[in-house]
């Protein structure tokens, strides 16, 4: 929690006191969370939570770039590392410190995720906004890309490994959807089939610059999972 406290101090110095009413967007640097945030624009803060995962999250592996792309979209960011088995309580505590009255998340159809977020919102004393909930994943992906979002594929399961390091955008979305169907994957990646890093959007002041360093292969649910490391 020390990292959170330090960043909170930086934010308070730069932006002044946290408002008595704050709209907080749960952000990862990926397409779904940022697009959800744009449906209730602008958020007062983006909250990036660092969890421990059996397989490293591409968002956390590339933490610096994940935070940078959120900042390029004009959203102040609070980053907090959560302790294992205490994630729920610490998330609620952070939301209370930020005086959250609205919470924005990018869940689409996984009921357990919605239930978890709903419970957190109630305990934090905030209203939950889930603007993507119930949408058709394939149609939603086309909508996001059609509105000028460009997403770098930073993690993906082995059946679609050729897409690692490629850019998902309006020009490539149809080929990506076809390959996802061939592999039996959700084209939106709601179940973790792949992860993205937004490199450009209508909300970005400038495109995110990056350099691909390496691709690491891990095992996830009995299948190879490819993670792109960036600088």
Image: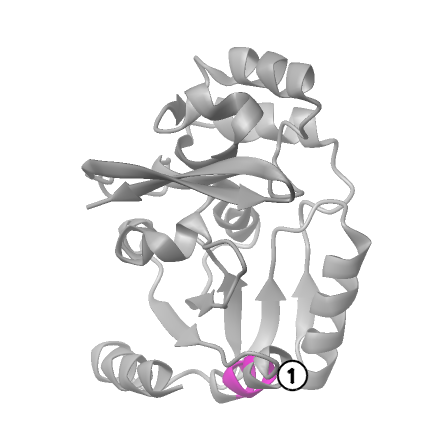
Q: Residue at x 52, y 53 (%)?
A: 37
Determine crowd level at label 1: few under 14, some 14-19, many 20+ residues with C-alpha closer than 10 A: many
Q: Which residues are magenta?
A: 91-96
Query: In which image quadrant can residue 14 be found?
Result: bottom left
Q: How many numbered marks have been drawn onto this rendered protein structure?
A: 1
Q: Is residue 49 above or below residue 107?
A: below
Residue 46 drawn at (x, y percent): 43, 64
Q: Residue at x 64, y 31 (%)?
A: 140
Q: Residue at x 65, y 83 (%)?
A: 124
Say which residue label 1 marks: 124
Q: Is residue 60 above or below residue 49?
A: above
Residue 165 drawn at (x, y percent): 34, 28
Residue 177 drawn at (x, y percent): 60, 18
Task: Compare residues 87 and 174 and report the one nearer the observer.
Answer: 87
Q: Is residue 52 visible?
A: yes
Q: Is residue 31 above or below residue 26?
A: above
């Amino acid at each position: 929690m020390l990292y959170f406290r330090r960043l909170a101090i930086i934010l308070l110095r730069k932006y002044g006191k946290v408002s008595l009413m704050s709209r907080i967007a749960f952000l990862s640097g990926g397409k779904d969370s940022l697009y959800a945030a744009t449906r209730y624009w602008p958020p007062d803060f983006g909250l990036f939570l660092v969890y421990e995962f059996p397989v490293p999250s591409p968002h956390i592996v590339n933490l610096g770039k994940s935070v940078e792309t959120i900042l390029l979209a004009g959203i102040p960011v609070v980053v907090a590392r959560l302790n294992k088995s205490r994630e729920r309580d610490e998330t609620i505590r952070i939301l209370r410190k930020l005086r959250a009255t609205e919470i924005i998340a990018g869940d689409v159809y996984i009921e357990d995720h919605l239930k978890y977020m709903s419970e957190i919102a109630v305990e934090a004393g905030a209203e939950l906004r889930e603007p993507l909930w119930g949408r058709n994943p394939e149609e939603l992906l086309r909508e996001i890309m059609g509105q000028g979002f460009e997403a770098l594929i930073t993690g993906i399961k082995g059946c679609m490994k050729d897409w690692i390091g490629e850019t998902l955008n309006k020009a490539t979305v149809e080929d990506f959807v076809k390959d996802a169907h061939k592999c039996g994957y959700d084209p939106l990646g709601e179940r973790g089939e792949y992860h993205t890093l937004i490199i450009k959007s209508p909300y970005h002041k400038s495109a995110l610059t990056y350099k691909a360093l390496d691709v690491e292969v891990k095992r996830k649910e009995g299948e190879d999972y490819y993670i792109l490391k960036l600088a």
